Amino acid sequence: MLADSDTRWKWGALTAHRIAPGARLDGLLLRGRATPTARQLDEVGVRAASLREVTAAEFLAAVDRDAYDVVVLACVGGTVQAMLHGLAHNLNGQARRPVTVTGYVGVVYEKLADGLLLRHGADVVLANSAHDAERFRAVYEGVGADPGSVVECALPFLGGAPYRKSAERPYTVVFAVQPSVPANRADREYLLRRAAGHARRHPDREVLVKLRSKPGEHTTHIEEQPYQKLAAKLPGGLPSNCRLVYGHMGEVLDRTDLLVTVSSTAALESLHRGIPTAVLTDLGVREALGNHHFLGSGCLISWDQLDEGALPEPDAAWTARQGVVADGPYEAAFDAARERVAALVARETLLPITPYYTLTTAPGYLPGVLARHGLDPSGALRPDAAAGRPASGLRRAVRSAVRDAARGAYRHGVQRVAPVIRRMGEL
């Protein structure tokens, strides 16, 4: 399984366990700006038989049918497309090859066509709900691409104990933050002030601000304004019953009575358990925020309403369409995917990997996508790309030190320099 961030590792590893129960899982982490740290991997709580960092070249060199029966590509769309072309170049024409599986880590509220067409060519493209499956097939059919790879399932990290209010602990409100939504400092400070204000207004409640990463760590998206730094500068600070927390989202939800977010996938986890779930309208209902995805959910509400004691009432038809609180046992949601993957693995030969994007359909787009991963337009490694051969101990140490320094410089630029430049541009 190839992953390029902590959230995609979580999705990919859990998906692999769901679609191929009992199979050995080898984890490959694509080296880049969002490569998860050991702390992030521990927080996700998913274990693999082996785990190592690789370049795109090293991944492509490692994949063959003798090594793997199934390859889960848990990466951003452009990376999936590049790996599919690389695998096609290396494996098409061979008698056997691994089954390729990909999908999305959560709510698909932006770049629907772009992301889907970059994933076309995989044997299985997983859709996390009936709603997504219909949209995915419509996109593929709309460009004349084969929609047969789309298979409906569910998010692999749903589940957990159904919600039961407890008298043994304080009523707990969890504000699930997101790295990039909202993006600007003023909006993020506003949300933090409102969470702190809710705690002051309700001293009998505990308000937890659930963080995704520590300063300097990266997730799927870049976090330019970490809530940790904003909280340190918040006038009056956080009240005693409001605090920042890390940890596995499932464990946090075990003690949650009200989940509040702008548009996090955590809302679906919460709804699946029957926890009251609030999707904030304070900053508007906008595509840029992703909360437009929750139109019709019954969950849209403001901090003012929450302060007054209002609780959202989820719409049962909407939640069922989104793959949460659906009829039947949760595990049954993966039956179709398991059957499809097992049937493909059992075949003596598979059809060649044939993505929709080729030099005929996208001659002005595809070469750039491939070049970012060291591939030429045919899917072959460029001569200047890394050969993927093992490094000596000294070379590994030097490469690791240089990589860590480069990441530090990049994060400093994202979190310190870029915001200053933007503020200067607004003067």
Image: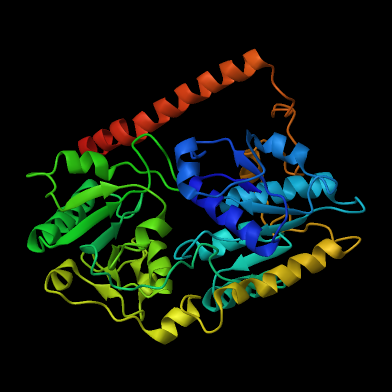
Residue 276 image offset from top left, x and y in percent: 30, 73
Does 421 sit left or right of 212 as displayed?
left
| Horizontal and vertical percent position of residue 126 | 62, 66
Q: Quadrant of residue 280?
A: bottom left
Residue farthest along the top direction in this orientation: 394
Residue 375, percent across and down? Answer: 70, 39
Indicate left or right for 57 with 188 as reference.
Answer: right
Give me the residue at 68% from left, 69% from top: 337
Q: Is residue 164 left or right of residue 70?
A: left
Q: The C terminus appears in which quarter of the rendering?
A: top left
Q: Residue 213's quadrant in the figure? A: top left
Residue sitting at 56 percent across and 83 percent down?
A: 328
* Marker count (numbered): 0
Q: Where is 64 relative to 315, above or below? A: above
Residue for point 19% across, 49% down: 189
Let me know if residue 364 appears in the view. Answer: no
Residue 227 at x, y percent in the picture: 26, 45
Q: Is residue 6 something one can see in this rendering?
A: yes
Q: In which quadrant of the rendered view does residue 139 lie?
A: bottom right
Front residue of 320 and 187? 320
* Above or below, comparing residue 339 to residue 174 in the picture: below
